[in-house]
Image (tube, rainbow, N blue to C red):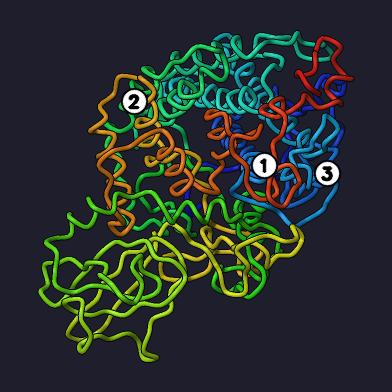
Amino acid sequence: MKKYSFKILIGALVTLFTFTSCLNDLDQIPKDNDYVLADELFNDPAAYKQVLAKLYAGLAISGQQGPAGLPDITGIDEGFSQYIRQYWLAQEVTTDEAVIGWADGSLPDYHNQSWNSSNEFIAALYNRIMYQITSCNAFLRETTASKLSDRGVTGDLLAEVQLYRNEARFLRALSYAHAIDLYGNIALVTEADEVGYWTPQQSNRTELFNFVESELLAIEGNMTAPKSNEYARADQAAAWTLLAKLYLNAEVYTGTNRYSDCVTYASKVINAGYTLEDTYDNLFLADNHTTTGVIFPVAFDGLRTQSYGGTTFLIHAAVGGSMDPDDFGINGGWGGNRTTSALVNKFNTGIDLTASNNAIGAASNWGIVGSATPNGWGGPDVVLYETSDADVKQCFATLVDGEIKFRPDNTWGNDFGDENGNIAVAAGLYKITVNVVTQAFTIESDPRGIFHTDGQNLEIEEIGTFTDGYAIAKFKNVDQNGLAGGDSTGNFTDTDFPLFRLADVYLMYAEATLRGGGGSESEAIGYINELRDRADNFGKVTSIDLDFILDERARELYWEGHRRTDLVRYGRFSNGDYVWPWKGGVKEGTATSAHLDIFPIPSTDLNANPNLTQNTGY
């Protein structure tokens, strides 16, 4: 395979992965010849790695044959049921970073923040998480020391299977961490529990937190070293990153902060030899498996992991209006996902203008004048700064809607603009570069803000109208040379989803340091400036605070599945401390109830297990 060498079992449904919550279907023996029983499967030494591949594939595919048919979970269209698709919807469409124009079932409840325990999308994500946990438990149950001994597994294979077990424990910890964050108090089930019809007891967030922490601490020393495993398989750095994320949110989950532990584990990752990808855009292309700075991706392949979720969903659903599907390596857009003005406006702030301009060089005699500048056409002008090229001047400036020209010495006579005279600009924060001899110039915004604005309105009048709200062009199914992914039909994508990456760890270190975790604030500022240096050197910071970190996480990590968790941690997801367009189903945004900070236990699981108690407020 292009990206990862281990085979994914899509053609055979393995009975140890059957999942129906607490229902007694777990007792049933499948009769279809395509089904493989556990005791038969593990007689083949190669099967251990194949089943491990299936565990990883549980994050990428939605069933046993893909893209539809033989689904892993039922009760919802299989295209909607894929792990990353459902996780993304819950983490992004509920926030200021995304809206979706479709009205399928209860989907509008997400951006309205009006969901309840009968919401089928909340249930699908819950079931997907539980299916993944059940799958990992089954693999661990079938690879105990006694069973391996009975099968005669020894030597190098035994060592390999022990490594696979640690990776399975990591994957289980990952899904439990998602469950803690999204649903709070769920049942804790491991490989030691019985198989068949039974109703597990409910655990609380603290118990679940302690379990996930203990699992990760137990395996971290026995995972492969950072960057030494096969692509898309977890290693020590993946375990450390998950621990850092767990510790950053510990106060939300348990009431006790663990910021010093977050600093410790973020530092482990930072010191593990990873480097940032030089070009931000490359992280989200079809060949992003060749980039640097990704710690743990969910791998997608347009030929081998076909589903209507993952990056197939992210890319197709984000294309519409005047966007050309060919530019995205797909056969057509689905016209669904956009962003709100709240995210767009984050890119108009966030740098220290004085420090950024002083870092360019000495003040020159050239400047910018016009209605878009603070002092208008009368000046004094916005100063341009000397660069290493005597002909080239540069500055960072915040402009408003209007026009500008360049001129020396705050006087007219040698002024110039574009071919039309004055240069029209929209409000925003820009890096402006001009060659005063050739009169060539560029006016650049933060290159991480990859918005499609042609034909799009900044503000959203109607959620269902794709041209309301800027479109996001961040994820594409083309490589760095502009070539489309491997599926010639244009249906399915090769772009991997970067679940963990170094930039997130930098930002976690900075936040935990500011929250009293004991790290170095000067180092944290250095990490932030590394992000900005990589983002085409877009501005410097000399000081940071928690509000800045929250906004910088949006600028760096938008649409990567972090935003809901971030807003909850900052106390800004529900209530009225922070509103955005269409929060609470109101165009201008409105306060919502704090009980929405976690999702409800789905009513289907409550009905199946009388030991479960619903989360408060539902």
The local crowd at label 1, few if under 14, some if 14 to 19, many if 20 or more residues have their Cα within 10 Å, is many
Which of the two discs, 1 and 2, labels the residue nearer the N terminus?
Answer: 1
Amino acid type, mark 1: Thr
Say which of 68 and 208 sits in front.
Answer: 208
Count of marks overlaid on the render: 3
Say which of 29 and 510 sits in front.
Answer: 510
120 to 336, vertically: above or below: above
Which of the two discs, 1 and 3, labels the residue nearer the N terminus?
Answer: 1
From where the camera sits, is residue 85 visible? no
- Residue position for label 1: 94
* Quarter of image, res 23: top right
287 to 609, vertically: above or below: below
- Residue position for label 2: 513
Q: x and y percent of residue 478 in the render?
A: 50, 66
- Could you tell me which residue is drawn at 38 percent across and 35 percent down? 505
Q: x and y percent of residue 279 in the render?
A: 35, 58
- Residue position for label 3: 106
35 to 291, vertically: above or below: above
Amino acid type, mark 3: Ser
Q: x and y percent of residue 17 in the render?
A: 72, 28
Q: Is residue 161 left or right of residue 618?
A: left
Q: From mark 1 to mark 3, how far is it between C-alphas?
A: 13 Å
Q: Is residue 137 left or right of residue 413?
A: right
The local crowd at label 3, few if under 14, some if 14 to 19, many if 20 or more residues have their Cα within 10 Å, is some
Q: x and y percent of residue 107 in the render?
A: 78, 46
- Could you tell me which residue is drawn at 78 percent across and 22 percent down? 617
The local crowd at label 2, few if under 14, some if 14 to 19, many if 20 or more residues have their Cα within 10 Å, is many
Say which of 340 and 3 sits in front.
Answer: 340
